[in-house]
Amino acid sequence: MISVLSGVWNSVEDMIVDYIDFNVTLWLLMPLLITFLLPLVIVLLLYVTALILYVYRLHRHRLRSAYGTDWRNASRSVVAAVWDAHGWIWHGYKVVGIENIPTDEPVLFVYYHGAIPIDLYYFISKVFLFNSKLIHTVGDRFLFKCPGWSIISDVLKVIPGTIQTCSSILKEGNMLAISPGGVYEAQFGDAYYQLMWKKRLGFAKVALDAKVSIVPMFTKNIREAFRSISWGRKLWLRLYAATRFPFIPIYGGFPVKLKTYVGKPIAYDGTLTPEQLQQKVAAALDDLISEHQKIPGSIFWALVERFYDLDKTVECNLKDTEKVKNKRE
């Protein structure tokens, strides 16, 4: 019996080898494999970040004398330089509207959450390098269970984010970034860039309690850089509802153009309720998305923008049209 089964298996194996060229199959599947492997580069960078921070912590006495500053601040500069370089080389990352950030007061940034918030890493790095100010961030609780995350959260000021904690950070004069959509928006958002805040009012309560302005922030093409798979949505929703853990596989790492738009500050208004403030901020963020993002997002056009700035072309066309109209008048 065993010999018969062995003979059948050998026949099937010979048939597969005869009719399928494994080299060709591997070549055809390579782009798919790469799209699922590239997100690991971001994970690798995060662990490189942790390694740099551990090095600075262990050798802070030598490094303090070398740099003449606290080891945490020195390590932040190195980490920020690494992330800023990665953003510039891979995505041609830039910030538009950085002048909208108040310089002499605390501020709460509210942003759209991509599948992987690499835009936030780049933005924090750029602000720290050029303004010497560290933006505190609110991270999902699952992150604090990841090995190596403790030193990142300590040095780069990433917190789980209760209303009281966030309010205290702002009252101390710091800057803070929150994505109301959080991991839910990261996992279940798509190329249509719809905000998925549900009835989350925490950020609004924080802003009202700390009496600070809110700056909306959106990064063009963030959904084209990394995407979560769209099939099996009901299954992933059930898993997320049961565990609050992001199980959906992420693919991408495409070198698309990333451009962060910083909106006008929404000043503190004590007459607003948290619900009203949430709606006001959501409307401002929706305006940024509709103004700057092609809907639905396209990976192809986002790649084109990496090397050819379509925004400038549109602006030039509009200016030319206005000139023609003025001449006619």
Image (cartoon, rainbow, N blue to C red):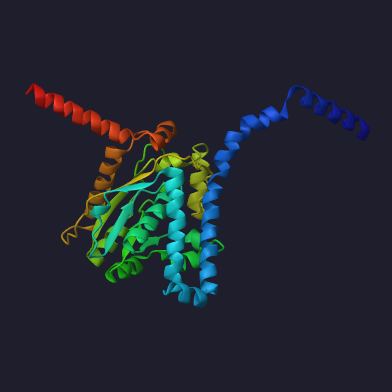
Quadrant of the image occupied by residue 324: top left
Q: Residue 97: x, y in percent?
A: 26, 49
Instruction: Work out which quarter of the rendered image holds the C terminus and state it.
Output: top left
Q: How many marks?
A: 0
Is there any visible trace of residue 80 in the rendered image? Answer: yes
Is there any visible trace of residue 201 in the rendered image? Answer: no
The residue depicted at 29 percent of the width and 59 percent of the height is 108
Quadrant of the image occupied by residue 272: bottom left
Instruction: Work out which quarter of the rendered image holds the N terminus and state it.
Output: top right
Asked if residue 200 is positioned above or below residue 167 in the image, the reply reads above
Q: Looking at the picture, tell me which residue is in the foreground, 42 or 213.
A: 42
Given the current orientation, which residue lies at the most extreme left position? 329
Quadrant of the image occupied by residue 192: top left
Please give left or right for residue 9 compared with residue 50 in the image. Answer: right
The residue depicted at 14 percent of the width and 28 percent of the height is 323
Asked if residue 223 is positioned above or below residue 268 in the image, the reply reads above
Q: Residue 42: x, y in percent?
A: 51, 51
The residue depicted at 35 percent of the width and 48 percent of the height is 112
